[in-house]
Amino acid sequence: THVVTESCIRCKYTDCVDVCPVDCFREGPNFLVIDPDECIDCAVCIPECPVNAILPEEDVPADQMKFIAINAELSPKWPSITKRKAALPDADEWKDRKDKLGELKR
Ligand code: F3S
């Protein structure tokens, strides 16, 4: 599966959802996740994300490993998103910030 990692938090650019052939993105208040049961590992979403938030599970770095469980945990709880929409209003201010996990709204 592919995994949405920390850099998406408080940005949510949503370019990724337009290209997904299996509609596996789920939308929370300030973050997206990928449903690991639906993702077919096509990887077309990876270059779409302006903050490089999406990675194949096997390439997730050690400091982002908790996002594998977060995608699995939140994807059944959040609604599907299949159409691109405006990024969060202050996305550009948050896109280069690190350690944003505390900002994640569930
Ligand atoms: Fe998030 Fe990047 Fe998609 S910021 S919403 S994973 S395009």
Image (tube, rainbow, N blue to C red):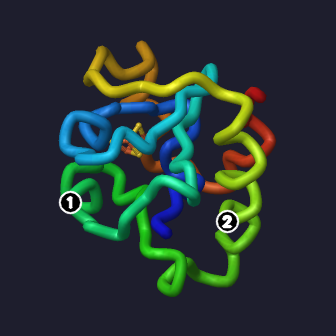
Q: Distance between the residues labelled 2 and 1?
A: 19 Å
In the image, is residue 24 above or below residue 45?
above
* Residue that appears at 70% across and 54% down: 72
- Image position, residue 76 (x, y; %): 70, 37
**What secondary structure is found at the residue carrying circle 1?**
loop
State which tag comes first along the sequence, 2 or 1.
1
Q: Which of 59 and 75 is in front in this view?
A: 75
Residue density around tag 2, few if under 14, some if 14–19, many if 20 or more, within 10 Å? many
- Which residue position is annotated with label 1? 44
Horizontally, residue 65 falls left or right of residue 11, namely right
* Residue that appears at 44% across and 75% down: 56
Horizontally, residue 78 falls left or right of residue 17, namely right
* Residue that appears at 77% across and 28% down: 106
Residue density around tag 1, few if under 14, some if 14–19, many if 20 or more, within 10 Å? few
- Image position, residue 83 (x, y; %): 27, 22
- The total of numbered circles placed on residues is 2
Horizontally, residue 44 falls left or right of residue 77, namely left
* Residue that appears at 73% across and 30% down: 77
> Where on the picture, by quarter, is residue 41?
bottom left
- Image position, residue 88 (x, y; %): 44, 19
Image quarter where ligand 1 lies: top left
Q: What kind of residue is marked 1?
A: Val
Q: What kind of residue is marked 2?
A: Ile
In the image, is residue 78 above or below residue 23?
above
- Image position, residue 4 (x, y; %): 51, 54
Q: Which of 5 and 71 is in front in this view?
A: 71
- Which residue position is annotated with label 2? 68
Classify mark 1 as within 8 Å of ligand 1 or not, answering yes or no. Answer: no
In the image, is residue 98 above or below residue 30?
below
Q: Nearer the viewer, residue 40 or 66?
A: 40
